[in-house]
Amino acid sequence: MKRKSGSDSPAGRGANLLTIFRFGKWVVGMKSGYLFLPRLTACLPMLLGLLAAGCGKQPDASAPAVAEVPAQPAEKRYPLTGEIVKADPERSVLIVSHDEIKGYMPAMTMEFKVSKGDLAIAKPGQHIRAELVERGEDYHLEKIWPDDAATQRALDAAAKALAQDTAMRGKEAYREIGETLPEFTLLDQEGRAVAGSRFRGKQVVLNFIFTRCPIATMCPAATERMSALQKAAKAAGAKNFELVSVSLDPEYDTPGVLKEYAQIRGLDTSNWSFLTGPDAAVRHLLAQLGVIREFEGATIKHTLATVLINEQGKISYRVDGSAWVVDDFVRYLKKG
């Protein structure tokens, strides 16, 4: 099925914050082609002073880190909604029955190139929303999110409740050791809605990362330590614990992106959840746990914190920055 006239003009090239391009294959009516787009990443790490302290309690945190890339020409993207018909891992495509894209393409069933992470969690019959990207003769789907009504209701209700809680706490939004972790609902690396209450009855080590963080001493170091902690705690006999990593960049870090992040690094997700979701929910969770995050164009500034939550859901220990000691957390987890 052909697109409407006027849709054959080449799309512009470009990237959002630290966008990583992938291989592409387009299949429509048994025609196929390949296109390689190189990875374009750049960064400029530097230390920035912490934001001026306001009224109320503030955690002792590391200086925000900075990542920046040169601006690129804007890439043409189209919002898409539809239903997954089939996943074809051998050809790295999803077959999707999508709705009309006004001014660009009528409703139809076609194949799209997607990432390995998106392929791994795709389920026939699942409703999704995504961005269609045309690169030459290739059609890609990126930023794929679950779009079923039940999931959206759960996410929206939890985000609204968390925002109200932050507003009611006011200047005392930051939660001290001994206070209860705020309630939240986010999506994990499988695309499932996960409520914070799911972890009650277990000890939880929670931190914040984002997948495109290029500063080796920040998010990559934090992930390496979490992996080392997981192995060390299991070796020490700790059993009733979970690890949780929440994305600082939820606009980019979809469930599929987080899935691929874990797969590439060989991370054990049997008791390690990577969470993402509405930016408003993440923003209020950061505020209540005292983590600074700011976007300024192509720059993201952030601090890091690793927080231990006990079986009752209370904050029992925290370390700011990424240079925490694995054995310190192991001792706490063994007590559980």
Image (tube, rainbow, N blue to C red):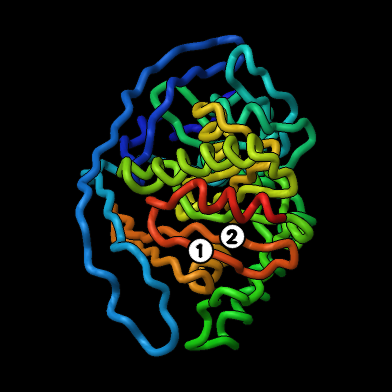
Q: Position of residue 276 (x, y in %)?
A: 58, 52
User: Tag 1's secondary structure?
Assistant: strand
Q: Position of residue 175 (x, y in %)?
A: 55, 76
The quadrant in which residue 101 appears is top right
Where is the C terminus found, in terms of image quarters?
bottom right
Disc 2 or 1, which lies upstream in sequence?
2
Task: Say few, some or many: other residues with alpha carbon within 10 Å of mark 2 (under 14 / 14 to 19 / 20 or more).
Answer: many
Asked whether 275 or 91 is in front, the reply is 275
Q: Amino acid at mark 1?
A: Arg
At x 25%, y 48%, the residue is: 68
Residue 318 got which mark?
1
User: Tag 2's secondary structure?
Assistant: strand
Callout 2–callout 1 Cβ contact below 8 Å: yes
Q: Position of residue 1 (x, y in %)?
A: 62, 23
Regarding residue 318, the answer to whether it shows in the image is yes
At x 40%, y 46%, the residue is: 219
Task: Say few, some or many: other residues with alpha carbon within 10 Å of mark 1 (under 14 / 14 to 19 / 20 or more).
Answer: many
Q: Amino acid at mark 2?
A: Leu
Q: Is residue 250 above or below residue 15?
A: below
At x 56%, y 74%, the residue is: 177
Asked whether 299 or 91 is in front, the reply is 299
Q: Is residue 153 above or below residue 232?
A: below
Regarding residue 103, the answer to whether it shows in the image is no
Asked whether 20 or 306 is in front, the reply is 306
**Which residue position is annotated with label 2?**
308
